[in-house]
Image: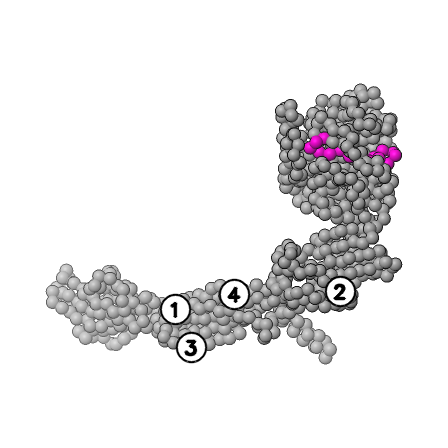
Amino acid sequence: MRFLLLLLLAALHAGVAPAAGTKSWELSQYADFLAGTFRDVALDRDGSLRVAPSLDEVFASDQAVVWSMALDPDGTVYFGTGHQGAVFRVPAGGSGELLWKAPEIEIFALAVGPDGHLYAGSSPNGKVYKLSSDGEASEFFDPGEQYIWSLAFDRMGRLAVGTGGAGKIYRVKPDGTGESWFESGQRHVMSLAVDSEGRLLAGTDPNGVLYRLQGDGEPFALYDSDLPEVRSVAVDADGGIYFAAMGGGMDRLLQAIPAQQAGIQVQAASSAAQAGVQVATPPVASSVTYSQPQVVYGGERAALMRLVDGQAVEKIWSSTEENILGLVMDPNFPSKVLVATDQQGRIYRTGPDRQLSLLSQTGKAQMTVLLRSADGVFVGSAHGGALYRLNPQPAPTGVYETAPRDTGGVSQWGRLSWRGTSGGDGSAIEINTRSGNTYRPDESWSGWSEGLPDSSGSLVTSPPARFLQWRAILAGDARLESVRLHYLPQNSAPVVRSVNVVPETAKADQSSGSKSTDTTSSYSITVSASGSSSGPQATGDRSNAAAPVRKLAIVWGAEDPDGDELRAEVSFRGEGESEWKTIKKDLPGPRLSIESDTLADGRYEFRVRVDDGKANPEERALSAERVSRPVLVDQTPPLVRSLQAGESGELRFSAEDLVSEIRAAEFAVDAGAWKPVLSDDGILDGPREEFTLRLQELEPGEHLVVLRVRDTAGNTALAKSLVR
């Protein structure tokens, strides 16, 4: 009995359309929360929210973008910028200042040498400059290359210079003398790092190859990526190598950059262009323009990979939407890596399973470069070149906001419940809601509600609207794991888009198994008074097959914006009638066939009315209807009369139809070919027409003349006369 009851309940549940009533909106998975915005809130891989490490602005420059950073052993941070070629210095615990401006307009690479000096690589027409603490600069090395993308010192104090144009690495001694050390065969050496054994690692473009170089410059390709550029490289405490590959493609993304005021035209490319970034340029003497191409290779734009023991390569993460702009080992967790992307300035961190979790979302368009230090991680940004510090300690509070939920129409809000923990000192979770009728929240939206008090279910007090947002304010060690909201959407009326009535023919004896497809209509036979006949008879198939049954098919197209299941009612009324007569109700499909014999000859309209009452309570159900164009039902052939043989071989007759016009008239003599005959008034346009046949050319004797007349509906009548 219990089994039967369960079956019954399941059947009832299956019979209710999804749009029948209350809907639920639940966020509980990592991907669910990722669509929202984060302010000092982290998203762990298990789908829980918590307060993130605080991200504090350290120094804001007047530059467009931060390209490069370097750390002095005393804690001083240097960063190089784009479009004005500036280098800034930010002492530990002090305020930032402009240290130097290069003759070139981009500083893509910085490195602090063993001698304590800062080295800066500039582009275009790249040079390496040596900077003193007071901002004095001297040209240290000129490789004669177009770009300098990367700098790195080896354990012997020699400077490796990764260049663009010919894809070479130069090795420069402390005295500034250098030589070409490795020719990659690529166009650009984008990134350099030193592995745990002191060997140089180099990431290239456009084939995305990661090389390892021995002391004599002998190369070994560690990995050939599917993506064209190895953007950055980092080495963990165990010797594992992390590297980021991108799908920007330098060859596609190089843009013409006008030179300084000398007016010489040169080319330069920027990491922003590589990442698909268009950085606004402040007014400067030299104009710089960057494009924002959307280049995707194999469905991916970026990938984070880890190479273990110089052999196995593991793809940790990939994305079709985000580019990795910065990569660094986490100073607090030596086995974890941090990556910065161009998606709302997100910073991710790998977890124990090496999957990425969202550590911080800055809200900036891009965080372009990461630098580890004893105080945390420094972050450089684009769209306002500023320096930030990602601190080890969490922020006091964090705020998470969902993306607006579109319910499809004005909805009534039910209860909101959540699951989480907030038991520690100062730990708390507060949930607020707001609603509005515009896609983006603006001044027309309601204000944020008071905090909902009951995690097991509090009634949402925001006014009914189409869109809803909720936010969570987290404090201390609180964790938010899931949120569920119930709402009742406004029911939308169905729409009947078309109603058509078409003829169809079926055999009356189909149930007997007959497969006959003969659909020939029977003729009406009229005999003149001057001839003889056995009476009216039908022409065509004279076998025992049943006569065809003529039918009308009412076909309609209807839909419901909510996806509700619809039911239909079909009715009709004749010309001159005031009330609709119902043919059938509760039709599930878009078609109904009726025998046309059930309607007398005349013009009719057919109405189809649909409603969503199967998916909604009676008080919420809505309907719509549509009326067909007038349909002519004409099952009676025309009447041919008054066949009179006149003088000089003339034959006169008339044809009349009760409901439609005469459309064709023909005659045949002695079973010969049919020939058209014109009405006396010269045009067939009315229900009654007069005809005169002139048969002067007939040979003397008796002749059989047969007349065939057809009305608008295709009904045909025959009449014959003997003419002597």
Name the residue tied to disc 4. Answer: 495
Q: How many marks?
A: 4
User: Is residue 505 in the magenta section?
Assistant: no
Name the residue tied to disc 2. Answer: 452
Q: Which mark is residue 15?
A: none
Determine whether the residue tagged by mark 4 lies in a helix, strand or loop.
strand
**Distance of mark 1 from mark 4, alpha carbons?**
22 Å
Which three-letter amino acid code belongs to the residue tagged 3? Glu
Q: Which mark is residue 631?
A: 1
Quadrant containing the C terminus in the rendered view = bottom left
Q: Earlier in the sequence, mark 3 or mark 1?
A: 3
Query: x%, y% of residue 81?
Result: 73, 34
**441 or 546, which lies in front?**
441
- At a point 78% along the width and 55% down the height, the residue shown is 49
Name the residue tied to disc 3. Answer: 579
**Distance of mark 4 from mark 2, alpha carbons?**
39 Å
**Distance of mark 3 from mark 4, alpha carbons?**
23 Å
**272 or 159, which lies in front?**
272
**Distance of mark 3 from mark 1, alpha carbons?**
17 Å
Q: Is residue 567 above or below residue 295?
A: below
Which three-letter amino acid code belongs to the residue tagged 1? Val
Q: Which residues are magenta?
A: 71-85
Q: Earlier in the sequence, mark 3 or mark 4?
A: 4
Determine whether the residue tagged by mark 2 lies in a helix, strand or loop.
loop
Tell whether label 2 touches label 1 (CB within 8 Å).
Answer: no
